[in-house]
Each structure stands twice: as structure tokens, then as C-alpha cells.
Amino acid sequence: MTDTQPAAPSSPAPHPVRMHVHAKGGEQDVDLTRAAPFGWWPAIAIALVAFIDRVEINLIAGALPEIQGHFGFSDTIAGLIPTAASIAAAVLLLPAGRLADRAPRVATVTIVVLVWSLCSVLSGLATTFLMFFMVRIAIGAAGQLYNPPASSLLADYYPDSSRGKAYGLERAGYYMGLPAGVIVGGAIAEALDWRAVFFIAAVPGVVIAILMATVKEPLRGLGDRIDRIRAAERDGRGASGADEHTVISGDVPSIWKDAKDLLHITTLRGVILAQAMLALGVAGLFYWLPTFLERTEGLATDAASGLAGGVGGTGIVIGIILGSRLGDRDRGRGWRIRLSSAFLLLGAVGLTLTVLLPGVGPRMAMVTVACLGFAGAMPNLTATAANVVPSSSRGMGFALLQFLTTLGGAFGPLLVGAMSDTVGSIQIGMLVLLPPIFVSALILWSVRHAYAADAAPGRRQ
């Protein structure tokens, strides 16, 4: 006997939906049965941007002993370099968020990457420490400006069911850039010269800017609109995507009012505070880890940077894969927040044992655990932020997130350097990174019940 029962409405209808997709151009057919209806190239391009950003920023960590030897500055001053750069970036982030909500985002990201490449060359040309310091501040100021427009682009290209993977790719690029920068900086400084480090890094920056320019600007709110169409088709109501898109209102509130309104979202507030605490620990860890291994284990510059970067990168890859896959298996009740809390707790334990356990082997094993935990949390935190912020304000939402996260991360390297100079021990200096990581997990856990209300469709349109 043939089964004639209708199929369960558990997936979108197989026929394509006719809808506007890009800011320029007409309607096109969109296959909503695909997890990523527009493909993965936009996410890959943005991941490359995040990667080269962190590579350039962390070149200095790998080459730090050589740069310190050339200019002769203390650990406190060494820690002050990324701190001053991060503060400069934070100053520009909220205006960048406003720009991301109103200007073409692809063009903005492309220009920012080209500016990095220029600043990288200027770093290698510096003839005095003051000149070097000022250029690093300039590149730090430009370094975070890609994030608000890039994160907004990802939320528009990818609906909720694939946002974890999309942001996972971006975070993979970002966090893989940390160890890659350390490895490249240490290897080139040892083989050639610390100046050559910055000259070589400018070349891939220009290439990635060209690749980013191939991404098309999507309509704002596109990903959310796909979610609503899918929900309507599952419910048997049918939907058309041809005539609905987000319109930017002509009534423009002040930046501070915009930020204040967004901070009323409990889940976003928790994610921001947790990431700020996490950034402090991660920034301090990757900046000082090669120097830490040199001083505690007697490794050479290239060996310390290569080992720190390679082992850390392994943990990051594993963490991103696990975090992205588990996060997209939505189990309700703030699943991504609960999962992120567990990952952060794992990372905090790994970092603690990295500092306390003697021996290269045990320390590197714990670096892997720490990086796995931190990387596993990040795509889920970013996807959570995208889900609770209205599509018309996502640029400002991600700018606010990056603003406070950047400020948090700014003080990690400085605190470690200052403590090291004060007590004469880099190991004790690294201990200041531990409490903020544990606090970040507790903050996230405390807001897990607010997610359902904050992510309701009526709150995000």
C-alpha cells in the first residue's frame, strides 16, 4: 500500500523563492533548502580579512625579543604598545558602527585592509622607538574597524541555522591569525631582521583586500527575512521575499542613545561583558606566551614563537569546529550561551595549568586546552549577539561589542608586563590573566534565561 500522507512540515519547501538579495540588481531565485543560500564565499573572504588583521597585530609578539633588543625598552613599555593601540581602536569603533549601518560595508572593509598594509610597511621603516610606537597605535586604531561592517554582512548573508558556522569561519580566521602572526614574526625576525617581518606582511594584505572587493553588498536584514520565510513555509502559510527589506530611517539618534538602547538587551550586555573579560586574558596570553616560554623553559626566539603558535593554532582549530557544530544544534533555553560558558570554563582551567605546570610538554598540552575552550565559545557568542540585535542596528551592535571587548583586551598585555617588572617574574605576571576568564564564564551563565525573550522575532525587526 502506498503511503499518501503529506510530508511533515519540518523543512522549507523545495521550490526557490523570488526575492531581492543585493543592494544593486533585481530579484533572483533563492533556494531556501540550502544551509547557506548564497554560498560560503562571503564568510571565507571575511575570515581572510580577520586572519590578516590578527597576523599583522601579532607579528610584534613573535619578534618582540628582537624589537626590545633593538630599541631597549622594558616589559611595561612592551605591554603598553598593544594597550595604546587597542585604546585607539576603541575610540573609533562606535563611529565605525554607525558607518556600518549606513555606508556600503564591503567597500569599508576593503579600504580598512589596504590601510593596514600601508601601516605595516611604515612599522618596518621606523627609525626611532617613538615612530614605531605611533605607527603601532595607528594600525591598532585601524585594526578593529573591519569588525562592525563584516559582522553585519555575515548576519545578512546567513540565516540563524548557519550563523554559527559563518561566525565560526570568521572567528577561525581571527584566532588562527594570533598564532600565525606569532610564528611568522619569530621566524622572519630570527632568519632575516625584525623590519623584514612587517614588509613581508603587507603583501598578503593587499591580496586579501582585492578578494574582499569581489563580495557583493547584500540587503540589510536579508538573513532574518529568510528565517521568517522559512518559518512561514513550515507553518503552511507560504511567504514571498520579493517586497520586504530593511529601510534605514531618516531619524538618526545620537551614537550614545543608540548604544544605550542596545545595552538594555540583557543577553547582549552579558555577551559584551563576558567577551571583554575573555579578551583581556586571550590578548595577554598570546602577546606574552613566546617570551614566557623563552624565560621559563630556555627556548630560542623562533622555537618559542613557533611552538606557541603551532600548539595554540591546533587548539583553535579544534575549538572552532566543535563550537560551531555544537552551537548550530539548537537545544533551546539559551543553548549557545550555556555551551559558551562551558567552553570558557574549560579554557580558564587550561590557562591556569599553562602558567602553573612546569615543563614544555605539560605547558603546551594545556595551551591546547585553553585555546580550544576560548575558540569554542567565540562563534556562539557572536551568533548570539547577531540574534538579539535588530538588523537595522547590527553595525552599531557589533561596534559596541567590539568597543568594550577591545578595551578589555587592551589591558591584558600591559598588566602582565607591569606585574613582571614589579615582581621580576613573567610567571607571576601571567597569573593576572586568570580571574577575568573565570568571571567571563560566570557572567554568561547568569544571562542564559534572558535569551528567548531577547531573540524573539518582534525584538529583532
Image (cartoon, rainbow, N blue to C red):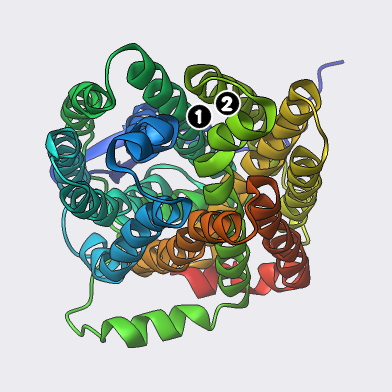
The amino acid type found where label 1 is placed reads: Pro
Quadrant holding the N terminus = top right
Please state the horizontal and vertical placement of residue 210, each as a whole percent of the image: 16, 27
Residue for point 33% across, 85% down? 256
Please state the horizontal and vertical placement of residue 184, each as a whole percent of the image: 39, 21
Farthest residue, direction right: 1
The amino acid type found where label 2 is placed reads: Gly
Q: Which residue occupies the foreground of this view, 287 or 384?
A: 287
Q: Give left or right: position of 440 versus 151.
A: right
Q: Give left or right: position of 416 versus 391.
A: right
**Residue 54 lies in quadrant:** top left
For marks 1 and 2 on the same chain, the one whose residue lies earlier in the sequence = 1
Whether pointer 1 and pointer 2 mark residues with C-beta atoms closer than 8 Å, the reply is yes
Q: Which residue occupies the foreground of this view, 288 or 113?
A: 288
Q: Which residue is mark 2?
A: 313
Q: Is residue 314 above or below residue 108?
A: above
SS class of the residue under badge 2?
helix
Q: Which residue is mark 1?
A: 179
Q: Give left or right: position of 161 versus 138.
A: right
